[in-house]
Image (cartoon, rainbow, N blue to C red):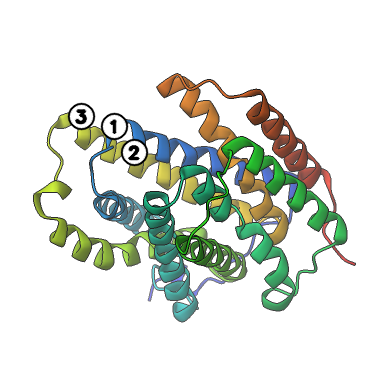
């Protein structure tokens, strides 16, 4: 065992402002990832994208961890496995719900995850959620609804979408808990590693459709992996600095960045209603960053 493996991990100092900003940055990176996939990989099976992302991220993160002599196994192996499996389940539920539901409905249901985090953080992390936080989360979710414009035609697939949101919330709680004892690289590497087996199986069933057809698609896969990696780095570091409820609420800025990428890449002009929603979500994110940790 290396010296790095024996050295106790010292969590970073709690800094709500930088933590929330990192979480907002992660939302931007993940929105960019989705935009790349939608623009340049529209006909590629979702699990093939998950597979290439998982393999490329795993290679990079393992190489960095070994270079910095950071232990990959970690101290809480079971929790690391749980975090990885929850992340894969959330990702799979989200992709599936996008295919089965109107996009606005799927996105809105996915961004219900801060509600689950706010409800469970007092139990899992002993981090209390204030009444003011609940108000901001509710307002932000309303802003998200204005941005994505759900149709309201929810079907049985909505249960899968909500399951994905719950898995996302639980994964965020696991990251926050792990950040107290594990190095960020140790936490990050387990997610892509554990997405490979399931996505590989699904990609094999899909056959040749899972393979890149030209250099442009190869570049797009690399772009997806790069933005996902940046998103995971900022997400993991952000949740190490701010309580889980506020941190995850800040990720509700994701649809706002999605609208901006839609304008830049597809020429989709946001409606006045979407612009109002963007302002609401942005204002809530600012208030979350300026607020104090919940203690009542």
Q: Is residue 60 above or below residue 261?
A: below
Snapshot quadrant of residue 227: top left
Question: Which residue is tagged 3?
Answer: 216
User: Is residue 39 found left or right of 208 in the rendered image?
Assistant: right
Q: In front: 201, or 270? A: 270
* Mark-to-mark CA distance, 3 and 2: 12 Å
Residue, x 74% and y 44% (percent of image)? 17
Snapshot quadrant of residue 157: bottom left
* Pointer 2 local density, CA inside 10 Å: few below 14, some 14–19, many at least 20: many
Q: Is residue 124 above or below residue 37?
A: below
Residue, x 53% and y 20% (percent of image)? 269
Label 1, secondary structure: give it.
helix
User: Is residue 102 found left or right of 166 in the rendered image?
Assistant: left
Does the rendering let one see residue 240?
Answer: no
Residue, x 28% and y 32% (percent of image)? 40
- Residue 158 at x, y = what percent? 50, 60
Q: Name, please, the residue furthest toward the bottom.
A: 78
Mark 2 and 1 residues: CB-CB less than 8 Å, in contact? yes
Residue, x 33% and y 51% (percent of image)? 57
* Mark-to-mark CA distance, 3 and 1: 8 Å
Q: In front: 238, or 130? A: 130
Question: Which residue is tagged 1?
Answer: 40
* Pointer 3 local density, CA inside 10 Å: few below 14, some 14–19, many at least 20: few
- Residue 13 at x, y = what percent? 71, 56
Name the image quarter holding the C terminus: bottom right
* Pointer 1 local density, CA inside 10 Å: few below 14, some 14–19, many at least 20: some
- Residue 42 at x, y = what percent? 28, 37
* Mark-to-mark CA distance, 2 and 1: 6 Å
Question: Which residue is tagged 2?
Answer: 37
Mark 3 and 1 residues: CB-CB less than 8 Å, in contact? yes
Label 2, secondary structure: give it.
helix
Does the rendering let one see residue 24?
Answer: yes
């Amino acid at each position: 065992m290396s010296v790095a493996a024996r050295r106790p991990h010292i969590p970073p100092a709690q800094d709500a402002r930088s933590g929330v900003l990192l979480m907002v940055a992660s939302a931007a990176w993940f929105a960019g990832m989705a935009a790349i996939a939608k623009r340049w990989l529209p006909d590629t099976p979702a699990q093939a994208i998950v597979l290439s992302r998982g393999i490329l991220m795993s290679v990079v993160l393992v190489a960095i961890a070994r270079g910095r002599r950071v232990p990959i196994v970690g101290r809480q192996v079971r929790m690391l496995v749980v975090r990885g499996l929850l992340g894969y389940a959330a990702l799979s539920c989200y992709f599936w719900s996008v295919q089965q539901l109107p996009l606005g409905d799927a996105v809105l249901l996915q961004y219900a995850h801060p509600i689950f985090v706010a409800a469970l953080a007092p139990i899992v992390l002993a981090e209390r959620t204030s009444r003011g936080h609940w108000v901001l989360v509710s307002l932000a979710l309303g802003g998200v609804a204005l941005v994505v414009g759900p149709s309201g035609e929810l079907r049985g697939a909505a249960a899968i979408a909500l399951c994905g949101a719950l898995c996302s919330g639980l994964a965020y709680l696991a990251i926050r808990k792990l950040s107290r004892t594990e190095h960020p690289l140790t936490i990050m590497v387990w997610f892509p590693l554990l997405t490979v087996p399931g996505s590989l199986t699904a990609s094999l069933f899909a056959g040749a459709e899972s393979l890149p057809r030209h250099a442009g698609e190869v570049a797009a896969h690399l772009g997806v992996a790069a933005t996902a990696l940046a998103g995971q780095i900022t997400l993991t570091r952000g949740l190490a600095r701010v309580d889980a409820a506020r941190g995850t609420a800040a990720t509700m800025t994701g649809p706002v960045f999605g609208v901006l990428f839609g304008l830049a890449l597809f020429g989709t002009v946001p409606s006045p209603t979407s612009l109002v929603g963007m302002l609401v979500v942005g204002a809530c994110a600012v208030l979350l960053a300026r607020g104090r940790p919940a203690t009542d």
